[in-house]
Amino acid sequence: MSRFPSDLKGPHPEEPAQRASRRTQDGGACFETRPAVAPQQEDRWGIGRLAFALSATVLLVTAPALADPPKPLGLGRPALPAELQAWDISVLPDGRGLPPGKGNAKRGEEIFIEKCAACHGEFGEGVGRWPVLAGGMGSLKADRPDKTVGSFWPAPTTLFDYIRRAMPYGNAQSLTPDEIYSLTAYVLHMSDVIRDPEQELTEKTLPQVTMPNAAGFFDDDRETSERHFWRDDVCMKECRSEPPKVTGRAMVLDVTPDSKTAPRVE
């Protein structure tokens, strides 16, 4: 029995008389051969294969044009306005996005002790390695600045946004707008940004609070201030005619503060 498929080339399966085979011997190896196919039969099958290939090609080419446009899968539904609003909670520095509400530091202290002091301490000093929220005023130019909300953050609305989005730890987005306004007022009060514990913060008054380090931040102006450094013919290979030279080392330049100038860490 041949190890080659009988339908690759040969007589039509309806003509059993043409399926006989004979064996010849050439150098000790046996090969199975088939009788030659009549020319007209070969032409008939060759034309058939060509016609089939052409029809398949036409079908593939025209199928996308004739196909109907894709239909919706029927999965899901359009989001409701309330669902979109639940995700759209970003608050910008100028106050856009603040929800209606009100609160003061006096009310915020009660909420802070109940829901925040376990990590941040009753006065924002931080428990263990949890973040410190208050203090650090005037330390930004020190070797190890104490970057707190009051000493470093540029906008009070950022504090509202962060509390609303991520606090309290383990139960985020569980606070009401009034509670968040009150907590914001209390954290600002701990750094003396707000002096009066009964000063009321709302979506109108919170953006008007000026942070001590507000001038320490500025918009990215590199397109104007650094444009004179830009070049079209930038060198990318073998740009120096001589090897680079080391002009200073970090330990000599006092990049790392020593124990005399650095604050004590326990």
Image: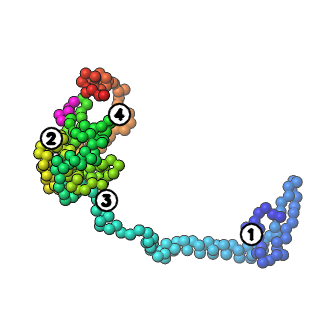
Marks 2 and 1 sit apart, C-alpha to C-alpha, by: 93 Å
Q: Main secondary structure of the magenta part?
A: loop
Disc 3 from disc 2: Cα separation: 33 Å
Front of the two marks 3 and 1: 3
Instruction: Give the image location of residue 84, x and y in percent.
Output: 31, 63
Secondary structure category for the residue under label 4: loop
Q: Earlier in the sequence, mark 3 or mark 1?
A: 1
Task: Tell me how the rendering is colored.
Answer: rainbow
Q: Earlier in the sequence, mark 4 or mark 2?
A: 2
Q: Nearer the viewer, mark 2 or mark 1?
A: 2
Residues rendered magenta in the picture: 137-142
Task: Say if 68 sits above or below 159 in the image.
Answer: below
Whether residue 34 is visible to the viewer of this picture, yes or no, is: yes
Where 118 falls versus 13 (above or below)?
above
Residue under label 3, please give it: 87
Q: Is residue 47 left or right of residue 189?
A: right
Amino acid type for the residue under numbered disc 4: Cys
- Residue 7 bears which disc, if any? 1
From mark 3 to mark 1, how far is it between C-alphas?
Answer: 65 Å
Q: CA distance from mark 4 to mark 2?
A: 54 Å
- Secondary structure of the residue carrying tag 3 is helix
Q: Quadrant of the C terminus?
A: top left
Of callouts 2 and 1, the N-terminal one: 1
| The furthest residue to the bottom | 14
Disc sitting over residue 192 in the figure: 2
Observer-nearest of 65 and 262: 262
Q: Is residue 42 left or right of residue 152?
A: right
Mark 2: few/some/many CA within 10 Å (<14, 14-19, 20+): some
Quadrant where the N terminus is found in the figure: bottom right
Query: How far from the left and from the top, in percent, is residue 228?
Result: 22, 41
Q: What mark, if any, has residue 239 been given in the picture?
A: 4
